[in-house]
Structures are given as C-alpha cells and as structure tokens.
Image (spheres, rainbow, N blue to C red):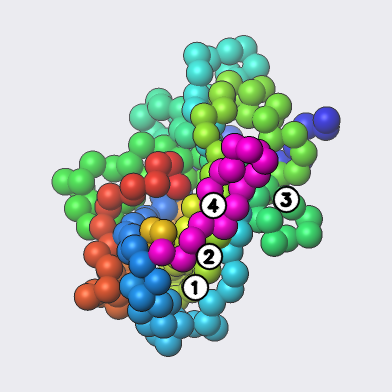
Amino acid sequence: MAMPTVNLPYPQTSQQLQTPYEACLYGSVTGSDEFRSVFDRLTLRTENGSSHLHVREMIFQAQLPSASATNFNAYSAAMTGDGNTPTLVCRQDLLDDKKSWIISTRGRPEPPRLHPIAIVRPAMHARANGDIHGFASTLGFVFQSETYKRGFTFGKGMVTINVYQLDVHTTETDSWEKAPEEATWYIEAKTPPTTVGIPQSVEALVEIRDLLKGLVDLNRDNIVSHT
C-alpha cells in the first residue's frame, strides 16, 4: 500500500518552529437520562446544534529510535520542548466518504501546578491518506490500541465538544457494534492547537465547564486513555 501523503500545518524548520498547545477537559455520565440532560443543554447553549460523530481512532506509541525516525524525532523533540517523542493518534472520520485520517502528535501535558484547571499539552495535527500502520512504523511508532467512538459533536467559540460512547468489539464476528444507550457517555471539550493565547483557550474551556455544571464535572482526568 502507498505511504500516506501528509500535509503539515506548521513550519518544519527549527528556526521557524513554535510549539503549538491544545487545552482539554474531560467528563462522563452513565444512563440515558443523564446523557439526555447533557445533550439538551449543549443543543440549546452551543452554536449550530449537534452533528453526528463516528470515528475510528488508533494509538501508536514510540519505540526505540531508528535511523528512519531520526528526522521526525528531532522535529517532535522541538515540538514538545522536552525531548520526548509524542504519542501518535490517528483518527479516521467514518462518516466522511474520503475516509481520510487526521494524524495528531501529542506531547506530555504541562504540570498541574502550571495549569490546574485543564490539560494543556503540545499538539500538532495533519491530514493524511494511505497506509497509516506503515507510516507510523516508519516513524518509529508501534501500534498500541484501537477504539471506535460514536456520538455527537458540538461547537462553541473555539471549543469543540464531543459526547460519545465507545463501540463494543464482538469477538465472534470480529466487528464493532454500537454500545447500549445506558453505557457510559464520555464528554471531551478541546481547543485547537495554538502558539499563542493559551490563557484564552483555558478560559473558553471554563465557560463550557460552567455551562455543564450540575450535570457533569469536567476536569483534567481523562479516563479514556490518549484521546
């Protein structure tokens, strides 16, 4: 299979590079009534209502550096600012006819003493098409896990809010099935990566946290790993 064509949205030279950061808050509710309360409030208080969400997400973790990964790891070290190669998250929109991928590199979150309210971490996103497994392997990453997320997406200002369940894998048919509505619903509020304006990103998340107060406690704890 052909290697993916990747379009990087950020400069690739160390002289030009600035570290982009994203900010995130997470929460969860269980039960159809609790979900409906969250869904209704977001529908009424966000922009343009909801849109359907169904994505496949694959997580890759860094292995020992290899010659083929040297350039990428050097760029990643500059991106994270601490020499750590970030996690590689590959996300495919299953509702998009093109079935293209969004590749995200995510570095270690800033310590809570610096950002006690929200997760703030280095991040970079790019679009890609092709053999994602081969692409990740060439960069020195190994496959770790795969999930399918199904639910709804909302937007308010710079914040994207995903409310979703995890599809259930059926061993007998080796397929992924929709979770029952009574299963846990996960809430993820996230701002796009930015090289400036991190305080504004956190403030925007606080607005969403306050909007959902009494229904769900949005905080730094991400119980769905690496999302």
Query: Please, what is the three-letter code of the amino acid marked with disc 3?
Result: Ser
Find the distance from the CA under tag 3 to the CA under tag 2: 19 Å
Q: Which residue is disc 2 drawn over?
A: 151
Find the distance from the CA under tag 2 to the CA under tag 1: 10 Å
Q: Main secondary structure of the magenta part?
A: loop
Q: Tell me which label, 3 or 2, sits earlier in the chain.
A: 3
Q: Which residue is disc 3 drawn over?
A: 100
Q: Dot 2 surroundings within 10 Å: few (below 14), some, or many (20 or more)?
A: some
Find the distance from the CA under tag 3 to the CA under tag 4: 20 Å
Q: Which residue is disc 4 drawn over?
A: 167
Look at the image and give the residue range highlighted in magenta: 167-182
**For residue 171: magenta?**
yes
Query: Residue at the spot x=55%, y=39% of the render?
Result: 146
| Number of numbered discs on residues | 4
- What is the number of the mark on residue 154? 1
As helix, strand or loop, the secondary structure at mark 2 comes to: strand
Tell me residue 223's x, y (percent). Answer: 34, 47
Tell me residue 15's x, y (percent). Answer: 52, 36
